[in-house]
Amino acid sequence: MDTWVNLERFIAEYQHRPLSERLRDRQRLLVQRLAYSSTARKLFGKQQPTTSTSPRLVQFEKTHAALVDELQALIGHARTTAATFAQMGHLWSALVEADACALVEQAHVKFLAAGTKLATLCMTCGTEILAMVVQPLEAKCEKLKQLHGLLRIEHDMQLLVLAATRKLERAHATGSKNVFHRQNELTAAKGYATRVATDLHVILDWVDTMRRQLVRLEMNSLASLLARHAMTAADTLLSPVDQTVVTSSSNRSVD
């Protein structure tokens, strides 16, 4: 889905900014969080500033963890299924090897052929589940975890705008020569905050809309893979078994 690409871009853009910007913003955020904390405001007798957080964002933060848990549970189920197929493959290999080691007159040629195919099929299905379901799902789950860590980025951007505003006001008050520079910083902070908030809400809208379909889509992918395996296994089993029965019946008739 294209929106996964947008989600990756959103996360990468925030995490891979120039080091100087990240260090500057981190320092300013630490100062602003301390200055605007309830403890500091009460200590200095000031009211809490209005850095409102969207109620929808608060609700999404509560439900987002549940979505990640559902996907992780699905990953665990898919891993268990893949491990089961691997065990079935080893079991068929052991049965084939045991039959091949029997006396020549007791060996079943058709069973050896079918068992070998089923062993390969089971191992292949287990590998495909890991490659086509588990690994892509783990990557998506990791992106959603990273998004969860950025849900408060809008609030952080508001604090950075407040910091830039205070620095501009201080520059005006002291007649500093950095007024133009501080004005540019404030303009850039407002523009970046607006763009980040817009991108974040677009992604949140998509995740909220796709929450149910996302889990169902991944479950359907696993179910489709298992159904294809079952059809192939049935085709492998039915034909050789029927031929073996016919051959055994013919041999008994001749005897």
Image: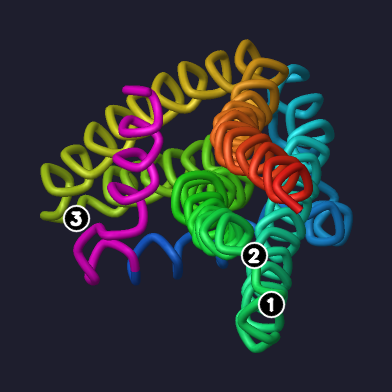
**How far separated are the C-alphas under marks 2 and 3?**
95 Å
Residue shown at 66% from the left, 76% from the top: 105
In this view, the residue in front, 187 or 71, is 71
- Residue 10 shown in magenta: yes
Residue 161 within the segment the image draws in magenta: no
Q: What is the spatial separation of the Cα atoms under label 3 and label 1, in whole angstroms?
A: 91 Å
Q: Earlier in the sequence, mark 3 or mark 1?
A: 1
Residue on which disc 3 sits: 176
Q: Position of residue 114 (x, y in %)?
A: 57, 54
Q: Helix, strand, or loop for circle 1?
A: helix
C-alpha distance separating marks 1 and 2:
7 Å
Q: Tag 3 or tag 2, which sits nearer the N-term? A: 2
Tell me the amino acid under the disc marked 3.
Answer: Ser
Horizontal side, residue 24 vs residue 70: left or right: left
Which one is in front, 220 or 36?
A: 220
| Earlier sequence position, callout 1 versus callout 2 | 1
Magenta segment? 1-22
Q: Are marks 1 and 2 in contact (CB under 8 Å)?
A: yes
Compared with 135, 250 (above or below) is above
User: Camera-side residue: 229 or 197?
Assistant: 229
